[in-house]
């Protein structure tokens, strides 16, 4: 990546139980994966 590149972030909820959930996120630049992550979140 270089300054000026556009980063596209896609997130998807995988599982949710009550206020807690798990999501999957993938960030791409020009169609190439820059980073992939699994996220845990809580809705307050």
Image (spheres, grey):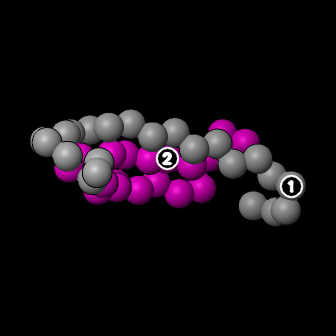
The residue sitting at the bottom extreme is: 2
Residue shown at 49%/47% (left/top)? 26
Q: Which residues are magenta?
A: 20-41
Tell me: residue 28, above or below residue 2: above
Drawn side of residue 35 relative to residue 38, left or right? right
Disc number at residue 29?
Answer: none
Drawn side of residue 30 relative to residue 32, left or right? right
Query: Dot 2 surroundings within 10 Å: few (below 14), some, or many (20 or more)?
Result: some
Residue shown at 28%/51% (left/top)? 44
The residue sitting at the right extreme is: 4
Query: Dot 1 surroundings within 10 Å: few (below 14), some, or many (20 or more)?
Result: few
Horizontal and vertical percent for residue 21? 23, 46
What secondary structure is marked by label 2?
strand
Badge 2 is on which residue? 26
Residue shown at 86%/55% (left/top)? 4
- Whether the residues at callouts 2 and 1 have beta carbons within 8 Å, the answer is no
Drawn side of residue 15 relative to residue 29, left or right? left
Residue shown at 29%/48% (left/top)? 43
Horizontal and vertical percent for residue 29? 69, 47
**Observer-nearest of 20 and 34:** 20
Horizontal and vertical percent for residue 38? 34, 54
The residue sitting at the left extreme is: 17
Quadrant containing the N terminus in the rendered view: bottom right
**Observer-nearest of 17 and 9:** 17
What secondary structure is marked by label 1?
loop
* Residue 24 on the magenta span: yes
Badge 1 is on which residue? 4
Which comes sooner in the sequence, label 2 or label 1?
Answer: 1
For the residues marked 2 and 1, what is the alpha-carbon distance in whole angstroms?
A: 19 Å
Magenta stretch: dominant SS? Answer: strand
């Amino acid at each position: 990546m270089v300054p000026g590149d556009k980063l596209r972030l896609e997130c998807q909820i995988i599982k949710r139980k009550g206020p807690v959930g798990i999501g999957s996120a993938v960030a791409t630049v020009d169609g190439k994966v820059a980073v992939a992550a699994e996220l845990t979140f809580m809705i307050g």
